[in-house]
Amino acid sequence: MRRFAAPLKVSASTKSDANPNATSKENSNASAGTSVASALGPSKVEEITSPHELTAYVEQLLNQIEGKFDDMSSQILERMNAMSTRVDALEASIQDLINASDNQQPGTPGTPSVR
């Protein structure tokens, strides 16, 4: 029976937390009626019109990458732990086979038949 590894499950990060490093000017703009998306940064490169928006956009991308990296890291660690458990079980099984073969009485070996 051959089992293949399942692909890692990485979904797009949907963090919509407010920017903790936002300046008071950006916060006042957000409260003055500008959209929430502009307070968090532009969602597309084409929407960038100022250095502050570029900074927010890059920070948003870095947060997404960090989230994906954390997800992948935890999945890899889970798989490594599962593989470790499987290897331990395999080692125990091999040791049981070795012990079982050592406990058998050695019989007289038969002569191979020649045809």
Image: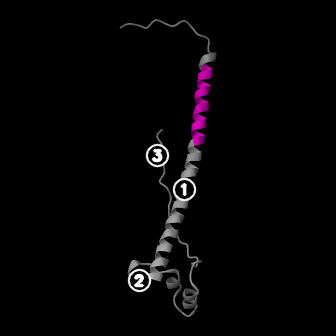
Alpha carbon distance from label 3 to label 1? 20 Å
Alpha carbon distance from label 1 to label 2? 32 Å
Going from N to C along the chain, the mark reached first, 1 or 2, is: 2
The magenta span reads: 84-100
Residue position for label 1: 73
Identify which amino acid the numbered label 3 is placed on. Answer: Phe
Q: Which element carries disc 2, helix, strand or loop?
A: helix
Say which residue appears at 46% left-offset and 40% top-offset.
2
The answer to if 89 sits in the magenta stretch is yes
Say which residue appears at 55% left-offset and 49% top-offset.
79
Q: Which element carries disc 1, helix, strand or loop?
A: helix
Identify which amino acid the numbered label 1 is placed on. Answer: Ser
Going from N to C along the chain, the mark reached first, 3 or 1, is: 3
* Nearest to viewer (mark 3 / mark 1): 1
Residue position for label 3: 4
Q: Which mark is residue 47?
A: 2
Return the x and y of residue 93 as percentages of the image width and height. 60, 30
Question: Which residue is farthest bottom?
Answer: 32
Return the x and y of residue 36 as percentages of the image width and height. 53, 85
In depth, the one of 16 and 92 nearer the eye is 16
